[in-house]
Image: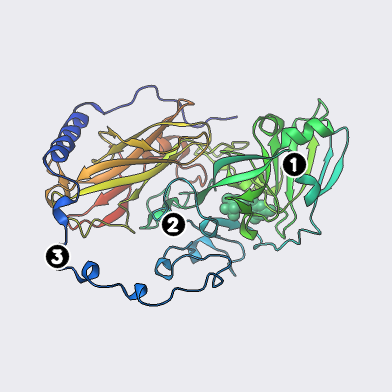
Amino acid sequence: MDNKKSQQDNVLGRRDFFSKVAAMSATALAGTSLLANESAGEGDPAIMHHTKWGQVWGDPVTTNLYGVPSPYEHNNTRRSTKLLASGNFRASIAVTPIHESEGIITPNGLFFSRSHGGTAHVDPNEYRLMIHGLVEKPIVLTLAQLKRYPSVTRTHFIECPANGGQEWRGPQFNSVQFAKGFMASAEWTGVYIKTILEDLGLKPEAQWMLAEGSDNSKMGRTVPVDKVMDDAMIVWGQNGEALRPEQGYPVRLLLPGWEGNLCVKWLRRLEFAVEPWYCKEETSKYTDLKPTGKAIQHFYANEVNSTVTSPSPEIPWTDLKEGDQVEIEGLAWSGMGTITTVDLSFDGGRNYVEAQIKGLVLPKSWTRWSYMFTIPKDFQVNGKQIILASRAIDDAGYIQPTIDEEIGIMGVEAVYHRNAVETWEVTKEGKVNHVQIRSI
Ligand SMILES: Nc1nc2c(c(=O)[nH]1)N[C@H]1C(S)=C(S)[C@@H](COP(=O)(O)O)O[C@H]1N2
Ligand SMILES: [Mo]
């Protein structure tokens, strides 16, 4: 495997800025309370009067036998754009509103979706999975038979390796949803493929596994047997219910941390062999062109990455004023391991302070981070406009590169595996814009 980014062993630039910002926040937190001085007081009719909804019957419990979000949340949706679609939107991508997401799980209706031939609608009664090639006992399973294997439940993100891939030459989208939302996270239930292979008997010469979809795109990708025997899963459950059609109902392949493209949906066939297949999606696509003209192939894991999600172009600070406390939040993730540290910069990545990691920290999972911040005068820190940037480190020892480091190695002709530090400027009105800062 060609690891395109070298490991950096030192964490740069925490020094003086760290102490300054830390001191600033500490003083602010000691001197004021969070929101206790903001009380609307006695005059607020919204708390003084009976509520409209408290004076009528509520809906019968039978109104939504399958629950739907409050109508007030109508804006919290996946989004798509012609820039990300071909022709009739069948081969297209709809991105997750990561700025609206809470915790580390994406609700199924908001899970990003990328399909090369449209969403297939599979009849579970006609569903079959064939496992063959270099196995002692080839098999064709129905869905019910597949589910008789012992199941496991694991939380993992799926990220299209093209996440951010439109932006090698600079921001295309003034939106965190479009810039970073080619990913989502769920609690998946299924069976480890190694469990099935213990049953069927994998022949020792097997080195590669072909996974093929039954949809119109016939998505085919080859996976090294090492990964298959490590943590590859066949999944049918997504956040406590069956997979959604967009996620490959009734069954998909899940390769924790690896390119979303390899997680073949509407899975029909697994075949084991000595050589890789060199399918269309691992030759013409999902390879990265380097400045030398050579392409990187068989490069699978999504590397350590992070983004600020709030504030963002979608969630600006325009309603906040000097002295207000606000939580800066974001996500960090790595397909190679567990997030250990997230750093936050107010000056575009020159200096960093350490952010707080919140909640569950799981391998190959979204990890939520946060930083309590006091809005400074004119939204300036040390007399300069704020440029937010986050940088994550994982336990495989990787640290996100700067955009200059990444472009230095990859040029700008690549599409996949962009994981450089992203930058977000805050204007003096509190608006947030996606920017790219070179040569810092
Ligand atoms: N059968 C099949 N599997 C597929 C695809 C497809 O078009 N057909 N798209 C792939 C791509 S490019 C990605 S990024 C992920 C997206 O998974 P999601 O739609 O559940 O987010 O599925 C992968 N698996
Ligand atoms: Mo993808």
| Drawn side of residue 327 relative to residue 275, left or right | left
For disc 2, the marked residue is 97
Residue sitting nearer the eye, 362 or 36: 36
Residue 335 as seen in the image, left or right of residue 58: right
User: Separation of disc 3 and disc 2 at Cα?
Assistant: 37 Å
In-front residue for pair 354/116: 354
Looking at the picture, how far across and down is residue 243, in whole percent? 64, 54
Lower position in the chain sequence, tag 3 or tag 1: 3
List the residue tagged with mark 1: 210
Instruction: Determine the secondary structure under disc 3.
Output: loop
> Which residue corresponds to the image point at 24% horizontal and 57% vertical from the top-left?
431
Q: Is residue 358 visible?
A: yes
What colour scheme governs how the chains and residues are painted in the rendered image of this protein?
Answer: rainbow
Task: Give the amino acid type for the residue marked by disc 3 in the picture.
Answer: Glu
- Which of the two discs, 1 and 2, sits closer to the camera? 2
Which mark sits nearer the N-terminus, 3 or 2?
3
Tell me the quadrant of the picture where the N terminus can be found.
top right
Q: Amino acid at mark 2?
A: Pro
